[in-house]
Image (cartoon, rainbow, N blue to C red):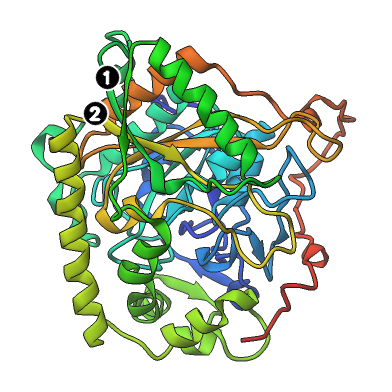
Amino acid sequence: MTGALFCIPILLKDNYDTADLKTTGGSLALADSQPTVDAPVVTAFKQAGAIILGKANLHELALEGLSVSSLGGQTRNPYDLTRTPGGSSGGTGAAIAASFAVFGTGTDTVNSLRNPASANSLVSIRPTRGLISRAGVIPVSYTQDTIGPIARNLDDLAVALTVMASLGYDVNDNTTALVPDSSRGVDYTTAFSGGNSLQGVRLGLVEAFFNRTPSEETTPVNDVFDDVMTTLEEAGATIVPITSLEYNSSAISSSFDVQRFEYRQLLTAYLENSSLGGSHPDSAESLYEGENFLVIPSQYEYVNTALVSSTDNATYASRKLGIQNLTLALQATFEENNLDALIYPQQANHVVKIGARSQSGRNGILAAVTGSPVVTVPAGFSPANGDAPRGVPIGMEILGLPWTERKLLGLAKGVGEVMRVRRMPVLTEREVEVKSYGTVPVIVPDGGSISDAYPIGVL
């Protein structure tokens, strides 16, 4: 067998269906849930020759960004073990930062590919909605869900994206019918073949996505971005301040996020699918019965509301209309300012500590509701300290118009070539005793690592 990923070791977020591994979403309620067929994108990986090493932990059912789950426990950030690795694809982020595999997969409903990349000094791409089939992946939101790769460098990221996007139209995910001919069968590694100069590039800096209140958690982000802007301008880019009041992450989230209206129906449909074997609940409501789940306290209201909501709610229709208007406003911003991309910090503060109420300060919602593509790249680090001997990673999002993945990868390459900020975590430099194994070892998740701040079985 040969292929673009021949003998390349990869990891899957544990919400991708695999016929040879259980797919749990990190939930004890799904500990014995066994798909009988692979997700289409998993089939694509296997046909390309990849070696799937296993599944990575995630924030339970991909509903938040702390990467804690009732089955997998708490994933820690390899750069600072007192902090979370971002999420919800935090297990993938921590594992790739620690060089456990060449790349891994994630999902992204609001921030979940980009936040772990930012928090672990990695690169990721949230593709335009529809570019990659989401079939066979535990769903959260029809409107906002996407899937994609996380890697340590852009070359690996482009190869992974090429394989994932090679699926084309999938009858089980009708958003794939939206892909224009110009975005079908693209080899994304060609994004780097013509040089990646930033000379003449126009980048819109979204001012409202910063937290300018000085603190130990926000000031390092602002300081890093001051340096980034200087570096980009010296490389020939023009930085255009974007001050529109429409671009406020909290306001966008409260006005346009539609997860809670779509989650219950989509999860139930997934659990009822005839291809899902093993022992598992048969509906979203039954999953949250008993004590085999974890919902962080800040999300009690969200989940309880989601379990009695649907797309029939009048509010859902008004939010969908609002999304259309925001999408048009975003396109107008690009046209009026002659922009190549928008840039901003993925998170306006450091990735939060373990035990925090939620993963605050993230800016992924604009791309999530408008379906826009984003490449996330390392921007820098906070000053080093005892908990973070190399500092806490800080990441930057590069957002483009739909179907501009190739252009965004080229811009990201140009940014990376003039910045070169990534550092490996100190933990990866430790010597590890090599053991001999007669059989493939079974990894048992450490459920005892969960903070008391996140009680299991409470809603």
Q: Is residue 238 above or below residue 135?
A: above
Residue 53 falls left or right of residue 275? right
Q: Which residue was labeled with disc 1?
A: 201
The amino acid on which the numbered mark 2 sits, given as a three-letter code, is Asp
Name the residue: 48% across, 34% down: 50
Image quarter where the C terminus lies is bottom right
Q: Is residue 63 above or below residue 47?
A: below
Question: Residue 3, percent across and down?
Answer: 39, 26
Q: Is residue 163 above or below residue 451?
A: above
Name the residue: 71% across, 45% down: 216
Depth check: 88 or 7 in front? Answer: 88
Image quarter where the N terminus lies is top left
Q: How many labels does the image show?
A: 2
Q: Which mark is residue 442?
A: none
Name the residue: 27% across, 19% down: 201
Disc on the earlier residue, 2 or 1: 1
Instruction: Answer whether residue 181 is visible to the viewer in this image.
Output: yes
Q: Residue 340 carries which label?
A: 2
Contact? badges 2 and 1 (CB < 8 Å): yes
Question: Residue 33, percent across and down?
Answer: 55, 72
